[in-house]
Amino acid sequence: MYDIVIVGSGLGGLLCGYILSKEGYSVCIVEKNKQLGGCLQTFKRDNCIFDTGMHYVGSMDEGQMLWRFFKYFDLLGKVKMKRLDDGAFDLVHIEGEEYKYAQGYDNFIETLLHYFPKEKDSLDTYINKFKEIRRSLDNFSSDEFDLSNAPSMKYYSINTFDFIKSITSDIKLQNLLGASNSFYTGKAESSPLYAHAIINNSFLEGSWRFIDGGGQIADILANSIIANGGVIIKNAKVKKFVMNPSDEFVESIEIEKQEPVYGKYFISNMHPVETFNKVESKLIRKVFLNRLRSIENSISVFSLYIVLKENSFKYINHN
């Protein structure tokens, strides 16, 4: 029997496994696929490595937020990375024209002023709001933190699209400022400013891409978990969370064509609906399940992967 059984080896499951195993708990991670990592997974075509999800990150300059996370999870110096160009970490194409997203607050504003010379006040307001929301995150470093009273919570009620429209009437600039919407679902009527600001602010602070793919993160975390005494079982599809005889708690998981795994506590890194579909317990009310199943899933995107002929295209250090 393990102290903690984690179902799913996506980034959340691996991070939980790392923290708990580092703190001395016996941990078992169960993954249905042969490759770990969820959206960290990579694949190869013609000797080129492609990311299925995460391929670049922000706030990775020394001392910044993600850099501190990488340091805690012992990823610094192990994950191969390269900083994207200061002048353009993203190049956005709209109606045949291209626009540069530059790193750094001042650099970002000055670069966009080349395209929108009359929008200085709009861009200043936009970046100042980023700084304001970023400062609200300082609450997370407090030992005593009440999420319900966190200043950052008010930004969830502000709509991204409405905010952008309020600072500029230029339609093209509105579209440009919302160009990263695929990172946070991007529905005009339901995308909170908080998500937009935190994601975009991180890239402005310091954008880095992964060399040889983001799958390195999954491999390094998995190796650390195993080194801490943890166990990782791949190719193990969970059929059911099994309750104890008195229906008080989960005591094991049933796995296709394998022995069950027993634990004191269970963490699911699966979709919430998929998780509860695998639990048979009178403790879970039908009204809760129906509400959960009725919640709309976030949208996704189609990705096109292309391998270019050697020496046919100059390498670019931006997206």
Image (spheres, grey):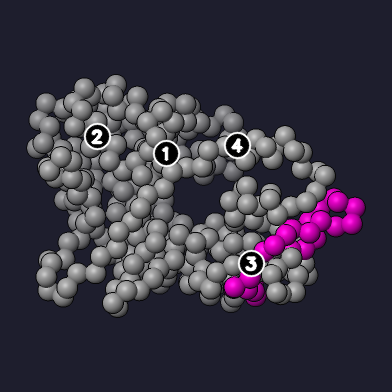
Q: Secondary structure at mark 3?
A: loop
The magenta-colored residue range is 229-253
CA–CA distance in space, label 1 to label 3:
33 Å
Which residue is drawn at the image coordinates 27% and 41% (left, top)? 179
Q: Is residue 89 above or below residue 227?
A: above
**Image quarter of residue 14:** bottom right
Residue pointed to by mark 2: 175
Q: Earlier in the sequence, mark 3 or mark 2?
A: 2
Q: Earlier in the sequence, mark 4 or mark 1?
A: 1
How crowded is the residue under tag 4: few (<14 C-alpha within 10 Å), some, or many (20+)? few
- Residue 145 in sight from this viewpoint: yes
Residue 235, horizontal then vertical, whole percent: 59, 73
Q: Earlier in the sequence, mark 1 or mark 3?
A: 1
In this rendering, position of residue 31 left or right of residue 123: right
Which residue is drawn at the image coordinates 65% and 62% (left, top)? 6
Residue pointed to by mark 1: 195
Residue 94, horizontal then vertical, whole percent: 18, 41
| Residue 233 within the segment the image draws in magenta | yes
CA–CA distance in space, label 4 to label 1:
23 Å
The answer to whether mark 1 and mark 3 are in CB contact below 8 A is no
Quadrant the C terminus occupies: bottom left
